[in-house]
Amino acid sequence: MPLPGRTLSAQLVWPVVGLVLAAVIANVAFAAWLATRNALGAATLGRERIVAALDRSRIPLSPAVVDALGDLTGSELVVWDEAADAPGTTTLGADRLAAATSLLREANDGDVITLGENRYAVGIVRAGGVRPERALVLTPVRNLAATTWAAVWPVLAVAAATLAVLVPLGLLTTGSIARRIAAIERRVERFSTGDFTAEQGGAGRGDDEVGRLAAGVERMRGELETLRDRLVAGERERLLGQLAAGFAHELRNAITGARLAIDLHRRRCAGSPPAGRPDDSLAVAVRQLEIVEEEVRGLLALGRPPATVPAAVDLDALAAEVRDLVGPRCGHAGVALASGPPCHASVIGRREGLRAALVNLALNAIDAAGGGGHVTVAAVADPAGPALVVEDDGPGPPDELAESLHEPFVTGKQEGVGLGLTVARAVAEQHGGRLEWRRDDGRTRFEIRLPATQIVTGETVA
């Protein structure tokens, strides 16, 4: 299993949250700086305006005028008594004035002083009047913390609301995407273990990019499964071909020796049977050897490419020849052998391979029909292409083998090898056709379907 790493949520949501927080901090810092700058600028501008107004004024700064100016401007005014070097008329209370005397005496124009809990910007002006007077204008400067808070709290409120919505929504969205991608990851992980089982539905499905990725992975699964099956089938056929070739070579040598021995015995015993009682046992034995030889030819077709050159093959004559070959086997098993109507068709193909395939199908049908059964071996015409047909009225293949009958070594017979249908399918595919079978009305029908393009026109083959 892969080591756990950063989750998709961590990679998508938290960077966004970090960017939002960075933006909030930047906005707060800028808002605080701007608010402080504006507050100081406003205080300076207000002080300068008061100073300018007093400088132009010719009104004596009496207590009534000073109180009025304080109320109108929101500033504190102190008229300095230069003779006593102490504050004179002022809007400051006695307690605040006592504490501020030393500060006011040393203050310069533009200074910022603190009186109690308040801060003031100092402006010094000499008012024109009946007698010039020196006045100190104390313009209040708002507390820096209060100014900053007033500027940044709306930004913080919006940011908090944004994060309160963004984080859960981001986690929900990315969590859903992460679960779908995790499902795809688990799917691909199963591919690496050889599990290509098709999956219905799944968290990865959808019409978005993740859904299309899941669909692509599913298509890849199908391709990998097909490729694996082809590799396995190819390897099995290769091994089967090697096995069949070696087995068939040895068996063919034995059959050839047996036929030579029988032929020699027939020549030595010519004319010996009693009159009226012909002995055909040797002919039957030769026929049985011919059937075995046909099966060997089929095995050789699995082990190596056909060596014969394709030629015109009369399908009716081929079916009749196969009926002659398997006739003794039918008589021994008590099976009735029948033919169908002629199809009058010839195809370009390899006669020995087609005959071996049809013999294998016929022998399987004889075994399936059993005593008292019926088997039909015929060639039929069809607009889609001719076919070599073997039909029997036996019980048919077991249901559990219906999908894998064509596979090597798959058989429903206790003593069967399971290569007959494999030979027939290989021959059909070599001729560009296919092997088909079906079960209808209590009869099992196998067909070697040949392509219509192989039909020979305007020619009769004996």
Image (cartoon, helix red, strand yellow):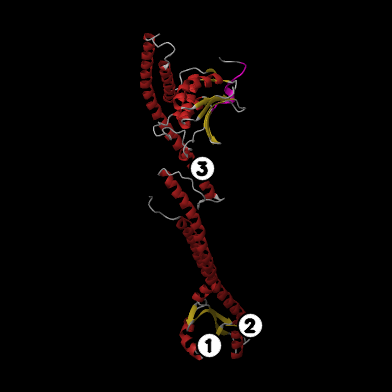
Where does the image place residue 330, in percent across and percent down from the top left?
47, 25
Separation of residues labelled 3 and 1 (CA atoms): 88 Å
Where does the image place residue 113, in percent across and percent down from the top left?
48, 80
Residue drawn at (51%, 60%) of the image: 172
Q: Earlier in the sequence, mark 2 or mark 1?
A: 2
Instruction: Please tell me whether mark 3 sits on a helix, a strand or a loop.
Output: helix
Task: Tell me which amino acid carries mark 2.
Answer: Ser
Q: Which residue is mark 3?
A: 219
Instruction: Please tell me whether mark 2 sits on a helix, a strand or a loop.
Output: loop
Quadrant (top left/top right/bottom left/bottom right) for the C terminus? top right
Magenta-drawn segment: 448-458
Residue 429 sits above or below residue 217 on the image: above
Task: Tell me which amino acid carries mark 1.
Answer: Leu
Q: Which disc number belongs to residue 92?
A: 1
Q: Which residue is mark 2?
A: 57
Out of 369 and 37, give the one closest to the viewer. 369
Out of 439 and 351, give the one closest to the viewer. 439
Task: Tell me which amino acid carries mark 3.
Answer: Arg
Instruction: Please tell me whether mark 1 sits on a helix, a strand or a loop.
Output: loop
Residue 85 seen in the current view: no
Out of 225 and 266, give the one closest to the viewer. 266
Separation of residues labelled 3 and 2 (CA atoms): 93 Å
Residue drawn at (37%, 52%) of the image: 3
